[in-house]
Image: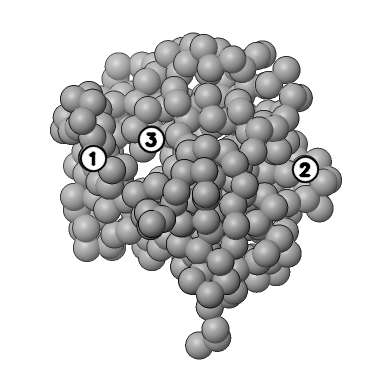
Amino acid sequence: MADDSGKTTHFGYQTVPEGEKAGRVRGVFNSVASKYDVMNDVMSMGIHRVWKDAMMDWLAPRPGQRLLDVAGGTGDIAFRFLARAGSGHATVLDLTEPMLTEGRRRAEAGRMADSLDWVVGDAMALPFPDGCFDVYTISFGIRNVTRPQDALAEALRVLRPGGRLMVLEFSQVPNDALQRLYDLYSFNVIPRMGQLIAKDRDSYQYLVESIRRFPDQETFLRMIREAGFEQAKYRNLSLGVAALHSGWKL
Amino acid sequence: MTEPPAFDRRMLEALVCPLTQTRLDYDAGRQELVSQAAGLAFPIRNGIPVMLADEARTLD
């Protein structure tokens, strides 16, 4: 769609018209889809698995719950959720088709096929009716959304009263020395690994820049409250390299 | 290689038009989900509905 609003947003460290961001983000993920899981492992030295498990610990899935996992890509969160809930249903929504096709190819997707739906869609305009999910998750996805506040409003809309929002995202390390060390790693090492493993330095350069541009823990907490979520809280993971934010629709 | 999974009709009940949040009609022949309200047809590719306005076909 043409963007005639004249508004701009950030794409990593570049400033781009709002209407261009989604297409560019899609370019990144179309490009990295088949190597996405192995890159996550390498980049975070396996720690993203620990973070996702921490997310499930706080979320405590219950039998029969209906999950919407936005930016759910390769199904990592949905598979974990269904395994912990025992029974239930998960809808995986992503902006890019290749990420979903990659997820559906995985073994867990076959075993849990009856409990899974895969949908290409936009976090800011969800193709679901009001109040139809018990849980909304978005894991390493919200920073790629053009207007995160709009995505939070949509999350609130599709959750039933009593439903839960949980966001896992890279965040800011609240210590200057550690942040410098982490920057050194992420700006120097990650794009090179992206080049080596996925033959795609630019996409990983974007991923690193987008992490630094995303609001810090307290700012994002305020955005969640502003969207209308209650009892909003956050927990730092690995000293704030990532954070979990939780909120309830009451 | 196995056939790509077909669109699951069950999903039709779970989905609405992302622009108008109204019901969709399934066109099995064209493999599309049609929103009369928005005047758009959303493609289904490899059994996965693509619910993006900029990927949708404008209805005549």
Q: Is residue A66 left or right of residue A187?
A: right
Q: Who is closer to the viewer here, A47 or A13? A: A13
Where is mark 1, residue-wise?
A: A2
Secondary structure beneath label 2: strand
Quadrant of residue A180 within the rendered picture: top left
Secondary structure beneath label 1: loop
Residue A102: x %, y % from top left:
47, 65
Q: Is residue A121 left or right of residue A116?
A: left
In the image, residue A197 sits, relative to residue A6, either above or below, namely below
Residue at 73% in and 64% down: A114
Amino acid type at image mark 3: Val
Is residue B42 in view from this perspective? yes
**Sequence-wise first label, 3 or 1:** 1
Q: Name the chain under label 1.
A: A
Marks 1,2: beta carbons within 8 A: no
Residue A181: x %, y % from top left:
27, 29
Where is mark 3, residue-wise?
A: A145
Q: CA distance from mark 1 to mark 2?
A: 38 Å
Residue A65 is tagged as 2
Residue at 56% in and 66% down: B27
Quick check: do tags 3 and 1 share a chain? yes
Residue A102 is tagged as none
Query: How many residues crowd mark 3 within 10 Å: few (<14), some (14–19), many (20+)?
Result: some
Q: CA distance from mark 3 to mark 1?
A: 17 Å
Q: Quadrant of the N terminus of chain A?
A: top left
**Sequence-wise first label, 3 or 2:** 2
Residue at 54% in and 84% down: B3
Q: Is residue A143 left or right of residue A181?
A: right
Q: How many marks do you count on the picture?
A: 3
